[in-house]
Amino acid sequence: MKKIINKTFALIVTAALSFSALTACGTYESGPETGNESAPAANAVSTDSAAPSDAASTQAQSTENGVKAINIAISSDPTFTFDAIGDSLMVTNGLLREGLTRYADGKLGDGLAESYEHNDDYTQWTFKLRDSGWSNGEPVTADDWVYAIGAMLDGTAQLSFADFLYEIKNARAIYTGEADVSTLGVTAVDDKTLVFDLEYPVTYFPYLITHPMHFGYDREFSNEVGVENIGTEAEYSISNGPFYIDSWEHDNLLVFKKNEYYWNADNIQYDQVNVYVIPDEATQVNLFLNGELDVVDFSYQRLSAIEGAGYTAQTYNNGRTAYLYYNLTNDYLGNKYIRQAISAAIDRDALVNGVLHVGSPADGFIPVGLAGDGSKTFREIVGPTLDYSYDVDNAKALLQKGIDELGLSDPKDITITILTTNTDEFIAVSGAIQQLLSENLGINVEVETSDSSAVRTRRNAFEYDLYLASWGADWDDATNFLGGYERDSSANPALFINEDFNKAYHDATYSTDLTERVKFLGEAEKVLLEEEAITPLYYTGHYYSVSNRVGGVLRRAVVPYLDLYYATVN
């Protein structure tokens, strides 16, 4: 089928696209077998140098007063919440707070646990903690996890996504007020022994707990400063990771310095991270070209400037799928044929290659790179879920079936509105989809954009027809994507209820056989997409570049998307 690239589409293609990945996861040798520990991490990309010698003269010196520092930028002043959600999409997640496990150069690696083991049915996990310290010198203990997880569930502290903790025994009941926090399945046997009792088998638990909502927090410090103040100023912040916040000039600069009490401090190869708050991508790129930043994310429109200055532009898969989801209570979109017609009328290749110039067309909901059975990724095992070929003739035929079922006389009787955030990416993509649907189907399509907070409010109130969004990997497992559509999920955005999906997801949840588990998850994904509850569009990607004085930078498909843990300063 011929791609539509007319004058209107060309205008969309030339729109400025801004991607800021710093705003929106080693072989584990010291612990016993965990069942999923050999699964490849989601597309960890490393770089040692990006700028050749002719650009080196513009780079900042690697040391100033003997301090080795790395300079990065974020687009807005961070929010360091108790549950770490505010900073979980940024580099700070990997530098300030550490979990029991962490990602390391392609595989699950060492965190604050020196070893761990599980019982036969994967419903209990026991962790032995290392000797490590918080940035105020207090020791890291098992009680940090008992306190932090309990405080989030009983309402003492902020909790953004309660579902992320529901695998823990009684977590749901505590959150809903049906059980006391004393019944939580997190137990400190002693200062160095932590036990998690779970509601069901979780073979991927060591991967799940890399997410910051499963991190510990110091009870005494929290009581001292007040849980409501945590993370609002440098003096109200504490770290059990390799760095801590030394100073914070809001909306301008945060300075991270090395935590001398951290267990692996001697192997962190630099002293300081300067985090500048710079909302504008163009300014970030100019500072990078001037040698004042060491890492920069940028859009396709700035590719020539980066390469023209002698730098190497790189791309990475950031573990996100952009997709449409439908308000199934809408008079038109409640019809499966109309949803299928919309999917067939969208040219995914044109979106990726004509608008974005990065990423790849989606052939399923679960993005490339996420773990599968421990030897292959999910997508390698399951393969493409459905045929998402661009087929206007089929789209028109499907639309006609829907029109007939609804008793309509003309495609122009249908009016739908696409709701999305006002990022440059989604403004461009929604405009392209608007054109494709209008021209290919003859339906009336409008686009409404707003800031993320306003859009989220409307989404949660189901005040939308068609919603353009993306979902990224918080942990390295397909459940992170599929769990939101399960019957009991509190985050079911499309009001999708399907017993075949629920059964497949339930079977995957309770399976301890990794091969069988992936099969069930693949079946659940297929049901979700065959019903066209959502329409995957593309797997997102980003351009970035790194200065020649910094090496060992990792880009990941799971948080932290920018990982400086293994970085070096030349």
Image (spheres, helix red, strand yellow):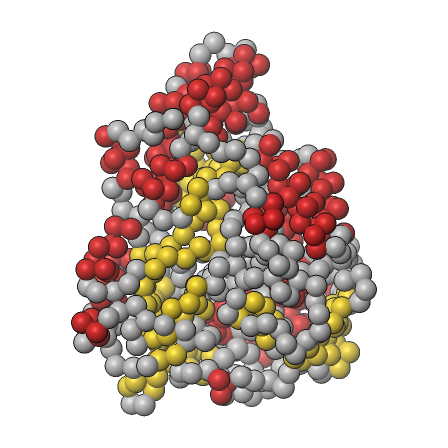
Which one is in front, 194 or 462?
Answer: 194
Question: What residue is shown at x 34% (from left), y 87% (from top)?
Answer: 67
Query: Which residue is at the front of the view, 422 or 114?
Result: 114
Question: Considering only vertical position in the picture, is 314 above or below 217?
Answer: above
Is residue 77 at all visible to an observer of this figure? Answer: yes
Residue 468 screen position, x and y as percent: 45, 39
Residue at left offset 25%, top offset 41%: 14
- 165 relative position to 63: left or right: right
Q: Position of residue 140 (x, y in %)?
A: 62, 82
- Residue 227 shows in this picture: no
Q: Residue at (41%, 73%) from the top-left corner?
A: 552
Specify the quadrant of the image occupied by residue 166: bottom right
On screen, 374 above or below 68? above
Left or right: where 217 falls relative to 340: right
Answer with the quarter of the image where residue 22 lies. bottom left
Q: Quadrant of the N terminus?
A: top left
Residue 49, above or below 67: above
**Foreground: 190 or 299?**
299
